[in-house]
Image: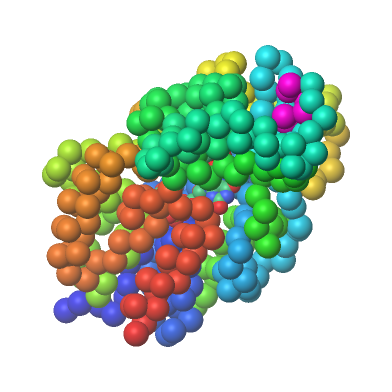
Amino acid sequence: MKSATILIVGAGFSGSVVASELASAGRRVHIIDKRSHVAGNAYDEYDEYGVLVHRYGPHIFHTNAERIFEYLSRFTEWLPYEHRVRGVVDGVPYPFPINRVTLNQLYGLDLDEVGAAEFFERVREPREPVITSEDVVLNSVGRDLYEKFFLNYTRKQWGLDPSELKAGVAARIPVRTNTDDRYFTDTFQAMPLHGYTKMFEAMLDHPNITVELGVDFANVRDRAGYGHVVYTGPIDAYFDYCYGPLPYRSLRFEHEHLPAIEQYQEVGTVNYPNDHAYTRITEFKHLTGQQHAGTSIVREYPQAEGDPYYPVPRAENEALFKRYEELAKREANVTFVGRLAQYRYYNMDQVVGAALAAAKRLTG
Ligand code: FAD
Ligand code: UDP
């Protein structure tokens, strides 16, 4: 006989939000993750020097959806934080996303807001229609800024030319005529006061939830015994790659502690579009507000092999995903949700939204 317990595969944002919602609605939930910890890619921990770091790269929470912010506020207090990024070109750090200060510094100009708008109008290469990431950037800032800030970063990050990626990838980055140098302009921008992992622990702390770590779904023998499965891992793996592997981009994270340096760089993240094998360096103390005599940083090296982190937004990949999605629709008693299962370049707030919607469908 099928048990009333629901099995959730993956204890990242998608799995944990669904678990919490189902448990609150009176359902029994068993959540597994093949990693040794909860929180998925948002996992944070104190390194051996006592600095709070994000094991899988920098995670900054931002959303315009008050509903999502309020929802997570049940599980954490917040530390207001607005992320700032610099892009290094020819050894000089410039505000990024490109704003008026970037233009003035780079080209030795003194543009006001109208002047900056006229500048972009003059240099842009109008594209119609805008389909690829190359189209997006050339259409808004023209070739020189494209080559300085976008072309090589994108090649490094994805192993692809911007012309091979859908518009949505580069469209994540705004272009500004004002002097706002924040990476995000969302209404709510904050970090969980005691870290992401603590927030997840609070989310999963419910008498109806059991958590089992270090368990791969592939090794769960009594799958059929569960009333329902919520799967948040890669969708192609679920179907044993029957149509071939879906490309997911991976990263290698190189963490480093600098004991004698209180501050390594002026802002949270510095991007290196044209130099080095890594794309960016993040210094965690900026993000967390932690005081410490030393500092901890992470470099991100993109690679094809390894844990899946990013779906790769290209038409052919999305066509392959659609084939898997058709199988998913026919899979009785299984819900597929999250960045890997839905093959969408979701931010954390979008994953929370998708998970809340999935939980609502399950609880009726
Ligand atoms: P995941 O966090 O990947 O969780 C899936 C879990 O499923 C994993 O823990 C995995 O171990 C487990 N799993 C998979 N297969 C199996 C299996 N067979 N058996 C058992 N367990 C399994 N978003 C933002 O909003 N702001 C940011 O600043 C930001 N920065 C990011 C930086 C990087 C480097 C990356 C990679 C992502 C970033 N994101 C950011 C996106 C954010 O990480 C995701 O939106 C979010 O973590 C997705 O949650 P998820 O639960 O769908 O997936
Ligand atoms: N990008 C770029 N140069 C940069 C930063 C970003 O060309 O300095 C492009 C690149 O293609 C990247 C995309 O914009 O993958 C989205 O950047 P974002 O910072 O949102 O990436 P994420 O934080 O999700 O890795």
Q: Main secondary structure of the magenta part?
A: helix
Within the magenta stretch, is there residue 106? yes
Image mark count: 0
Residue 26: image x %, image y %?
42, 85
Residue 72 showing in the rendered view: no
- Tell me which residue sits at (19%, 64%) in the image: 329
Q: Is residue 205 left or right of residue 240?
A: right
Q: In this view, does 304 lie above or below 64?
A: above
Query: Splitting the image into 4 quarters, where does residue 158 fall?
Result: top left
- Image quarter (top left, top right, bottom left or bottom right) of the N terminus: bottom left
Q: Is residue 357 above or below residue 185?
A: below
Residue 191: image x %, image y %?
69, 55
Residue stretch in magenta: 102-107
Residue 128: image x %, image y %?
40, 40
- Tell me which residue sits at (53%, 45%) in the image: 172
Residue 49: image x %, image y %?
73, 35
Q: Is residue 1 left or right of residue 120?
A: left
Q: Is residue 131 above or below residue 193?
A: above
Within the magenta stretch, is there residue 256? no
- Image quarter (top left, top right, bottom left or bottom right) of the C terminus: bottom left
User: Is 44 in front, or is 285?
Assistant: 285
Residue 350 showing in the rendered view: yes
User: Is 113 in front, or is 160?
Assistant: 113
User: Is 345 in front, or is 53?
Assistant: 345
Q: Is residue 117 above or below residue 214?
A: above
Q: Is residue 296 left or right of residue 120?
A: right
- Tell me which residue sits at (79%, 21%) in the image: 108
Query: Splitting the image into 4 quarters, where does residue 61 fall?
Result: bottom right
Which colouring convention does the figure follow?
rainbow
